[in-house]
Amino acid sequence: MGILAPMSLILLVCLPFLGALLPGLVHRAGRGMQAIAPALATVCGLAGLGSMAPAVLRGEVLAQRVEWMPQLGLAFSLRLDGLGLLFAGLILGIGLLVIIYARFYLSPRDPMGRFFSYLLLFQGAMLGIVLSDNILLLLVFWELTSLTSFLLIGYWSHLDEGRRGARMALTVTGAGGLALMAGALLLGRMAGSFELSVILTKANVIQAHALYLPMLILVLLGAFAKSAQVPFQFWLPQAMAAPTPVSAYLHSATMVKAGIFLMARLWPVLAGTPEWFGIVATAGLLTMLVGAWTALFKDDLKALLAYSTVSHLGLITLLLGLGTKAALVAAIFHIINHASFKAALFLSAGIVDHEAGTRSLSRLGGLARLMPVAFVLAGLAALSMAGVPPLNGFLSKEMLLEEVVHTGFAGSPWVLAALVTLGAAVSAAYSFRLIGAVFLGPVRADYPHHPHDAGAGITGPVMVLVALVLAIGLAPMLVAGGLVQVATEASAGSAVEVHIKLWHGLEPAALWMSLAALGGGLAIWGGFARLAAFDRAVHLPDSAGIFEAGIAGIVRLAQRVTRAVHDGPLSRGVGLALLTMWGPSVWAFAGGSHAAGNRATTPVELAPMVLALGLVLATFAALWLHRNRVLTLLLVGVVGLVLSLGFAYLAAPDLALTQITVEVVTVLLMLLALNLLPKSAPAEPLPRRMRDAVFAGGIGIGMAVLSYVMLMRDAAFEPISAFHLAQSKPGAGGNNAVNTIIVDFRGFDTYGEIIVLGIAAIIIAAVGQALQGLARSPAPASADAHPVMFATAARLLLPVGIMVGVYIYLRGHNLPGGGFVAGLVVAIALMLQFLASGLGWTTARLRVGFFGLIGAGVVAATVTGAGAWVWGKPYLTSWYGYVTLPGLEKFELASAMGFDLGVFLCVLGAVLATLSSVAQLTQKGAR
Amino acid sequence: MEALVSAIIGLLTAAGVWLILRPRTFDVIVGLSFLSYAVNVFLFASGRLAPGLSPIIDPAAQGYTDPLPQALVLTAIVISFGMTAVLVIMALGSYLRTGSDSTDFGKPDDGPDTRDAP
């Protein structure tokens, strides 16, 4: 591999995400191409991993790091050590096999591109987990695997069981993810860093910490939920509603091993304490037994494999729980072995399902003669699962037995050994049953399809996996020894001796236990009918049912609350919401201190008194006359006008300009709407109005008191405005601090806001479209729709309005004004034309579409912001300088002006789009 | 002045709440406008009142008002226009489709909602 320079780790993680785009891009090239593209991405990933493997196998740890949010301790830092190499190899290797298999497995009706996009997204998320050095980053990828798993389980979204299985998996693993997040935060706090490379060196600090146990429980909740350990085992069988390649990939070989990976990753820090042993070993043992017992009696082939997966995950967890290095070696080794034989079995189950048309064991049998290749492959994989020598499953199971012999459990030296041997026996029994029920026995006449061996594309991947099963079984040290060694050393954090041998002589107890398990397995298989009757009689509790009943209960409760609150009238729900806010506020106020504020009051002059009087009168008149809607609207306009004068008086000229222009636009909009809405409302009973008045008065008084309390005190913390004022000129190149905050200091807020405004305009246009033709003609208010005097005056005003708008825009950086106000002013000037000459007349003369304006605005703001990158500065960093052009005075140019231009265009487009949408409705109505 | 501004905030809030509780779409929208006024003045006032000062940098200035609440309120005014406009088109849609501008939607479990049928 010396030819290849080691690939960047970041590129390795990003490859699958890039690959996920490919199926969409080659959509037209046909189904073959849609599979080849993601397969190529995976092959590139494998090649990249291969280029790094030699260094890792030598014991080096590769790392790459980009800061993300250093304040939070979050960095995009990746590491590749032995454990990561093992898992990344499994993810990419089995991923490639599954992609090839799925190409031939999916039916022509299934949208293939979508499937491969989801699969690659999952692959990327999984690679992210196993290569993260930062545990916060690991959490991000952890959640991503839950989400992509949801998409993959629900891939056949027309199936009820698919949707249900997807929901259940997401709920359980998502809830586990939350617990893990809390645990990771605790862990990071204890270690003083979120980097694994630091955390793994702090075992003493962490295990001595008072919060060790809560942290351990939270982390384990996440790991157990993901790896389907008791009591979370129920989601995994439900996830089998996914297409079989997904079951093979996510739910046996990779994703369910994420929990195992996490336990192995944090092993040096968490393991070795009595708490760890008590929780992890017990959960593992229980899961192993429950899973094996349940698997034994399943009739659905995939359900049997699902529970056997649960059982084997329990086995690995048990090994990790034992806390010894030798057990860790066995766990790591079994991860490889289980991935190989279980993926082979799942893929074989898919072949059987595909060929025979059913997965029900009671309807299968005798396939050995019809599908000899599948029989050999699935048979070998199942025998490996049973623990038959010389296959790889035998080796790791013997290592397990060897370990438990030495371990006391529940106060007795032999309990654990006996229980594990029993588990192994049941495991052997269901493996034998699988072979027997599917392949042995007489050929039947009633298969739904006519089974025969599948093509090379679908059998090939299984062959590769089974070859691995055989090779590891026959030459474990040669094939897997090196990888197991570096992976275990990376997991344990210290040197480890790895000796895996097929034959240890006749002395070890494990050999005899292994033989006992196989014999027991045969015996259980032989007595299967009687055991099945016993199982039906005792009936283990159905945890999936309990979970679903719990969810259904929560949904019923939510429905009851919703019905109680939203029982029809909007006012009731709003009233309850307001009451909910009001209650705690009054309670908090009653419990607080009420000392008078110490801030000096501002004297009241005559002019603001008069203004306030006008506002009070207009408000009361609006309330009194609210049933006369046109009049109400004019009174609202008066209130808005007074407020804008108030803003001007209180040293906020920008606000005054904005308020007055928005007021004009709003009143015009509402007037247009009133063309279609009823112009008056029926009377309401007085008691109701009085009751609401008392209620509203209470809230108003509350707000008034709150405002007064605030105004009479200084801010609890020093406001940051001093910084803005000091930096306005040197930092952003503008004298108007309000404008520099909008376009520079808090430019990202503004950026979001203009986009929201644009979205609102698009919503309005879309709803307006949908309402076309519904409007009834309002009675014409005047015989002359477009009076000549008005039209002429409006046209004369247009250039003046535009010039004022441009002037306001240009001066905005240094004096009151700016993009927002300028956009509104120009919009008003154009709206005057709507009113005076009609919408059609105006739009016919406007060369640009309104949505084009919105788009241009967003693009201008984006490009201006991104321009800073060219100079290596963060997004939206502004630049300014002075320019001299011949014939003009020296003037200032600031990049923020480009941003403000975006604001201007976006506001203009949004206002015009909104008004024209509503106006269009009225015009249709008038026709 | 502080008491006056507080009283105005209270009055605008009360007017907004009272109108929102009316059972007609138009009144609800006007009520939200009043509530927006109240909230905007409240946010603006959180920079404290400073008549006579200015947020424009000037070497001769005695002092400045707090520009940050002003910037926030400025964008809030524009956004509340967008919000009002969305509500207006919703109200229009509901009126044009049902022939009523009432905000009493009937019980949610009254069976299938057929009002959307054209």
Image (cartoon, coloured by chain):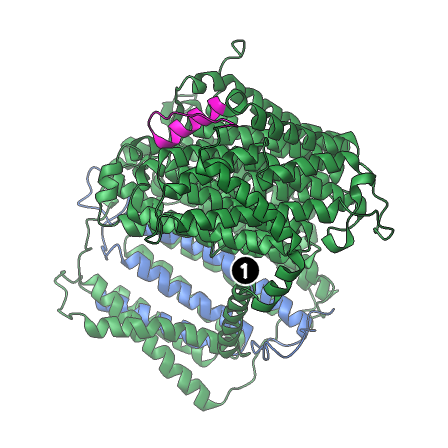
Chain colours: A green, B blue
- A381 and B39: which is toward the camera: A381
Residue A693 seen in the figure = yes
Q: Tell me if residue A630 comes above or below residue A429 in the rendering.
A: below
User: Which quarter of the image is occupied by the C terminus of chain A?
Assistant: bottom right
**Residue at the farthest front position:** A506
Say which quarter of the image contains residue B112: bottom right
Say which quarter of the image contains residue A491: top left
Q: Is residue A622 left or right of residue A609?
A: right
Q: What amino acid is labelled 1 in the image?
A: Ala
- Residue at left 55%, top 35%? A394
Q: Tell me if residue A725 comes above or below residue A922 in the rendering.
A: above
Mark 1, chain letter? B
Label count reads 1
Q: Residues within 10 Å of mark 1 (few under 14, many from 20)?
A: many
Q: Is residue A56 left or right of residue A441?
A: left
Residue B45 placement (x, y as % from top left): 28, 59
In reply to whether residue A483 is colored magenta, the answer given is yes
Secondary structure at numbered mark 1: helix
Q: Is residue A83 left or right of residue A277?
A: right
Location of mark 1 (residue): B85
- Residue at left 51%, top 30%? A88
Residue extent of the magenta highlight: A481-503
